[in-house]
Amino acid sequence: MSEPAATPFELRDLAAEVGSEINDFLLVEVRRGHAAETKSSASDFVTAVDRACETRIVEAITATRPDDGFKGEEGTDAPGISGVRWIIDPIDGTANFVFAHPGFSVSIAAEVDGVVVAGVVADPMNRHLFDAVLGAGARCNGETLQVRPATDITRSLVATGFGYQPDRRRRQAHALMTILPEIADIRRMGSAATDLCGVALGRVDAYYETGLNEWDLAAGALIAAEAGAVVKMPAPDDLMVAAAPGIIDDLLALIGRSGLID
Ligand code: LIP
């Protein structure tokens, strides 16, 4: 017997409750220092804490919603029968966690019948809890968010990130040679979820990256969009962009000239 359908607000609140618990746990663990293994390349870190957090998130949600499905960065992959699928990155920005550097976040998104309807990103070191419900806005610690009204890309801060495979990193670095001279500056936080929330918060005016996984961006993309950003999800060109409406066209044109995408 599947549980009654939950509203997106109830899914958001459940994600926020679980995200806050993991937030507190990570604030303790980050000070302990943790040995990192690597996954797809020497720069693709993972720790036992990543895996423990994913397990804890799945257990906590399952206790309330036993029929839901899950997709997690550290291997959870369960279809569920309720129509709700949770997309989880237990620590987005693991390299930052390993070095105790700000810029790692817990990302939990609730997808209903293929559409992300609620998202939570918890940033422990900034003590930020971001959340959003589709069509109902985005918040940081309960305060409504609105992107900065940027209109001039030459005066904009733009966040980006770099993948794990050397060939992709070379292409991303080469693209910066075109992009960087045309904007105010680049910021590299090391976490897509944190960067997407940075657009929503107005900490940066835009974010772009190629090669992301769904768990990196599912919650943050909803938060950025609900804060008023134009969000271009990975299309066939694999490009993720979130930007203030006043600079999106100039940013896409700049990226188009940079050789980042085919
Ligand atoms: C991170 C992404 C980020 C990217 C990093 C890394 P992870 O995910 O969120 O955008 O630039 O290189 O891939 O692997 O730390 O969860």
Image (cartoon, rainbow, N blue to C red):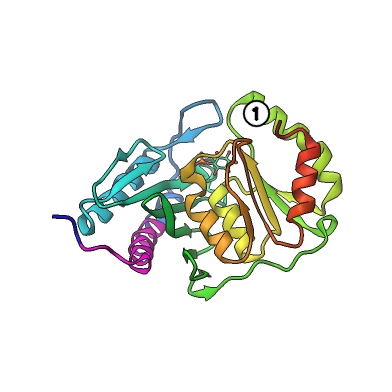
Drawn side of residue 45 relative to residue 251, left or right:
left
In-front residue for pair 8/146: 8
Label 1: which secondary element: helix
- 131 left or right, relative to 164: left
Is residue 184 something one can see in this rendering? yes
**Most common SS among magenta residues:** helix
Q: Residue at x 53, y 75 (%)?
A: 143
Q: Quadrant of residue 71?
A: top left
Q: Is residue 99 above or below residue 60?
A: above
Furthest-left residue in this view: 1
* Percent position of residue 126, x then y: 54, 62
Question: What residue sits 48% from the left and 71% below the top?
Answer: 136
Inspect the magenta stretch and tell me whether residue 212 lies in it: no
Mark 1 burial class by Cα count in 10 Å: few <14, some 14-19, many 20+: some
- Give the residue pinned by disc 1: 168
Q: Quadrant of ligand 1?
A: top right
Segment tinted magenta in the rendering: 4-24
Q: Position of residue 261 (x, y in %)?
A: 70, 34
The residue sitting at 76% across, 64% down in the picture is 150
Q: Residue 185: horizontal and vertical position, in percent?
A: 79, 51
Magenta region includes residue 11: yes
